[in-house]
Amino acid sequence: MKMYVTGLISAMLALSGCAGSDALKTDVANAPAYDWVIDRDEWGIPTGKGETDADAAYALAIAHAEDDFESIQGVYFAANGKAGLLNGREGAGSDFLYHLFEVQTRVDTYYEQALSADVKALLEAYADGLNAYAMQHPKEVEKGIWPLSGKDVAQTYLLFSPLFYGVDSAVGGLAAGTLDPCSGDIAKSDHFRGSNAFAVAPKAAENGSTYLLMNPHNPWDGPLSWYEGRVHSEQGWRVAGGMLSGTPFPSGAVYTDAFAYAPTVNRPDLIDYFLLTTSDDRPNQYFLDGTWTDFRIEKIQLKVKWGPIAIPVSRTLKYSVHGPAFETPSGWVAMSYPDYHAPETALKMSEQYYQMGKSRSVIGFLEALEMRAVPSFNFVFADRAGDIGFIYNANLPNRAEGVSGVDCVRGDQSDLLWSGLLPLTANPRVLNPNSGWVFSANASPFYVSRDDDNPDKETYPINIGIDDRLTNRARRLSELLSDDAAPFSRSYLRQLKFDEAYSSQSAMAVFVRDTIQALENDPEFSEAVSLLSGWDLISSADSRASLFAHELFNAYHAASWWGGEVPELKDHTRSIIDSMKERYSQIDPVLGDVVRHMRGAIDLPLGGGDDTLRMIRSVDVGNGRRRANYGDGMTFLIEWTRDGEQFVHGFHQYGSALGRKESVHFDDQATPFVEKKWRNVPSPLPVASSDLETQ
């Protein structure tokens, strides 16, 4: 057996002379002995190594905790329904979802039977690693959740899985009484959320290589920020990529020596609303199939931090056979969604991510998807053999005939309930297209390659629930990966990633042209018209028009995306002009003077914008400046040559030490990120140099 002495010595030190609660001490003292080590490259990016998968998971947990323990701890407060104790009212919404999703009950019921022994051992080891770190660093520990177990790790997936297809937005509106889906309202979530991915087969590459670009978009700070890590187990678990706080499996951009995949957020219609028949005389019943049926009623208590004390807040939850029920202006409405109806399958998400990360080919990956535990996300993928593809992954409900996911359904007939899920083979997919390329950018699955390779929209029933909108990023990828540009060089693909332009066919371009036409004869708006007329549709750091165009366009984009009210153009334009002059003293500030990459002592100008391939969103920090905080962050470009040799190129917007300001790796990738420089990244198998390279 290969002994990882460094890990064993560190564990012994962690067990000797550390403060902490008696429960945490006992838990760590009783933990199995792990055989592990953490290797960090010159950028501080860790590889958790071990004899077994569990050993590697233990090492990865300690490494991630060393880099960002605060975010991890916050995730586990949420996963245990105690975010309100940590974050007050801000955390209470998460705790409400925890109770509504019945996270604890479902984990207790299905954990043992849903997960394999190997995955349970891995989850327990990851929890043990976090416990060991917590005991060694008691000043960082908040009381209330420690020690953790493998069940706690599994709970993170049950809590966060439904959020990616919009359940949180729906629940928020229903619980607050602001959403009335049976009168035509829809739940509005983040219309800019997204990611970019594309794959290129050898036939379309200048050098005969296979490429996969993985660029997930998430907040840059907090528990949803991407952390780069790797695991290397002698047992065979060797995978790398981006992971979220508190989870042991890379999921945001994942690669091994032989296979890689990239998720992008899709918006399948996985939520249906059922209008229940109720009576004031029967407050705890609803009418179903000619019979008054009891709601299942659960009473919960949220604990919300208020200064030095925790205030208990009581709530009553009601469930029908359809799902959780809420009182709306139209009456009592129940909400159906896949995770509610298949709790055991939902709990297998960790198992599925484990199997997806061990895939060696496209075939193995598609087999892992058949577990159906990951309810949404598009996936773009490629393998060392040169196979590439796209799949619109979604647990689409098998709706009753004549029932559309966009309608409010009668809740008094059980034959209108879902009858399971449609098979995954019913979802759009593209494998090894004739074009040699495929992409995804949070847009229609019928627009992911050349026209003759795209799935035929007309062959899919209208009630299947597939979203069919286009983003600028999708349009730009289609243009930049066209036959006119092929065959593609490595240099071209790396430059493509940083594209800051809007397609001439994009919603932004159409809006700008329409605005110019509508305002060009009105002297009041001559400055605005002149500014927009001279814009090249590129959001470069030196652009003077793009900030004004973005601010003017945002309200129209939101309205067109969600079907909301469109503001009156002249009044809206006046408002934006006044606002920009108040904040920047002009309507045409240089974009990079306003939008800044701020990290530690670094404060640099940044280009890009909402829905460009260089996706950048920012937040106002005063004094006419905005701090970039979302979008184009951790990115990898995977390449396999004709001979099967692998090269990985990547970058991160910050560095590996996400939560450690004192570390050199807190901001060591921030300047290269602004300068659009890549680094060579070690693959899950040892080891390449990591010198910086330009585009």
Image (tube, rainbow, N blue to C red):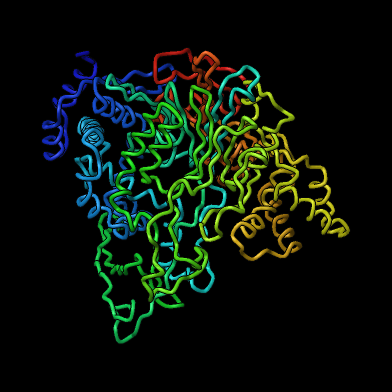
Q: Residue at x 70, y 42 (%)?
A: 502
Work out whether residue 374 or residue 566 is closer to the camera in this orientation and state it. Answer: 374
Tell whether 88 sits left or right of 582. left
Expressed as whole percent of the image width and height from the top left, the position of residue 611 reads 62, 44
State how many labels appear.
0
- Residue 391, how many percent across, how many down? 51, 41
Query: Percent x, y for residue 117?
Result: 21, 35
**Does 192 appear above or below 491?**
below
Location of the N terminus by quadrant is top left
Describe residue 524's horizontal placement relative to residue 215 as left or right.
right
Residue at left 39%, top 52%? 162
The furthest residue to the bottom: 281
Residue 662 appears in the rendering: no
Residue at (22, 40) in percent of width and height: 150
* Residue 149 visible, this angle: yes
Q: Position of residue 205 (x, y in %)?
A: 63, 22
The correct choice, above or below, for 614 with respect to 36 in the image is below
Q: What residue is at 41 percent from the left and 62 percent from the top?
A: 171
